[in-house]
Image (tube, rainbow, N blue to C red):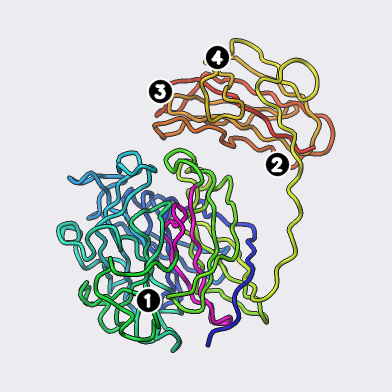
Amino acid sequence: MTGPPITDVRLGPPRLYHESTGDTWDPAWAADDSLVFVGNDGSGWRKACANNVFFNRVRGDDPHDLNGETICMPEYGGGAEKGPDGATWKSSGCLALDGVIYCVVARHTYGTHSGDRFRRQTARGASVIKSPDGGRTWERPAHENYASPMFPGGRFATPYFIHYGQDGVAPPVDHADRFIYAISNNGFWCNGDNYILGRVARAHLGRLDPGDWRFYRGGDGLADAAWVSDPEQAVLIIDNPLHCGESGATYIPALGRYVLVAWSYPGDPNVETDETRLIFYEAPHPWGPWTAVREVASRPHGWYCPRVLAKWQRAAGSEVDAVLATGGDYYEMDDYYRFTVVPLQLRAGGHYPPLPPEPMTCTVSHLETGPGPNRVEYRGAWRQDDSRPKTLTGSEHLSGAEGAALILHFEGRRVRWIASKENSFGIAALSLDGGPERRVDLYTYCVEPQMQRLVYDSGPLPPGPHTLTLRLTGEKNASSKGYTIAHDHFEIEP
């Protein structure tokens, strides 16, 4: 039975698992009560791997206190390893069903080389693979998926299975006890344009035969006539160009509704990775109609590939407490490129009270120089570079001179440093009120400059006057090509 529409959502404080590294997590609820999922481009838990694709299992009764383990999948190549087609293996959706684990792999080409006019990472040639032994071995083999993918092209290249209950158990709604549903965008990891819906009989999923799949073409989704064998003939269940990153839907049994969280980068997905926009959609059936409930900005962590978990849903009247699993900014590996869980509240009918407004901030640009409060005093050799188009003022101060420093006197309860990161930048050291220095590495492996990055946050401070001292250390990490640092601006909470 369907319930009244979900009308509001609210996110709580995240829990980042710093013992993990990677992204594109899509946790499924397995028979043994664990979460099982494949990850991409990282080392998994406790640096177990360096692979394009690897399998994870996490256990625990509390989503904020989980213990994970990783099994490597070396047949899918080392981290970012490209094949003859210039693409790499990546995963999308995962499913636990009757003791068997399923996931989807496809060939992805990074946005810097994909040829897409929006520089999006493209996905092509998806296949479903399965593991009957807890992720140790997988069918179909990688070479078969490469040579003869189940779903050639990009129309069904990022399928995410709709999640219902533990080990795939589903209520008799929308024929979910007879079929497995999956949603795919039009062949992009990020910033896709739309989604379509596919289904396969539960009894046939394990055959891994693309001929068993059908795609929703419109009308009553309970009728066989609403389904066709060609994904190119499918109707769009959500159409929102450049806002449909790969994602999956989850059934909320207490509300009788489905939730899908679309996501996108508002800027260049190859550089501006510290902000994403999450759009929460809800629907009474897998085929819709899908309605946007709320849009949320994620910054500076840049969460992407979000999934509402089937596990840990707790209902109280017209509200459900749930958990969102996601990962964050892949250029900030030490900070956000982790398995992350976020408390999520869903409400059917009415809205949550508005959140308190964000604290007011005072911006001090690199051009506001001189002695006195909220001014920057430069020491040593600095130069102004006016060819920095994506900075606050179109310019920055840069220095490569060891011992160069700047001083900021301010009154406030918090200060943040906003600066650029480049693959030729070095390490700065910051001291607040004469205290111990905190080192900030301005290197990024991104081939292009990343501007207006949050690189330092003091955290809450006692009210009153403070002094922040920043100096160039003359040091760099082993991967950097140089020692330069750049200064854009400070943000001060009075």
Q: Amino acid at mark 1?
A: Gly
Residue closest to the far top: 381
Kindly identify which residue carries mark 3: 481
Sequence-wise first label, 2 or 1: 1
For the residues marked 1 and 3, what is the alpha-carbon distance in whole angstroms? 55 Å
For the residues marked 3 and 2, what is the alpha-carbon distance in whole angstroms? 31 Å
For the residues marked 2 and 1, what is the alpha-carbon distance in whole angstroms? 52 Å
Q: Is residue 258 magenta?
A: yes
Q: Which residues are magenta?
A: 239-265
Sequence-wise first label, 1 or 3: 1
Q: Amino acid at mark 3?
A: Lys
Q: Is residue 286 above or below residue 185?
A: below
Q: Secondary structure at mark 4?
A: loop
Q: Secondary structure at mark 1?
A: loop
Kindly identify which residue carries mark 2: 459
Kindly identify which residue carries mark 1: 218
Kindly identify which residue carries mark 4: 402
Please tell me whether mark 1 or mark 3 is closer to you in this view: 1
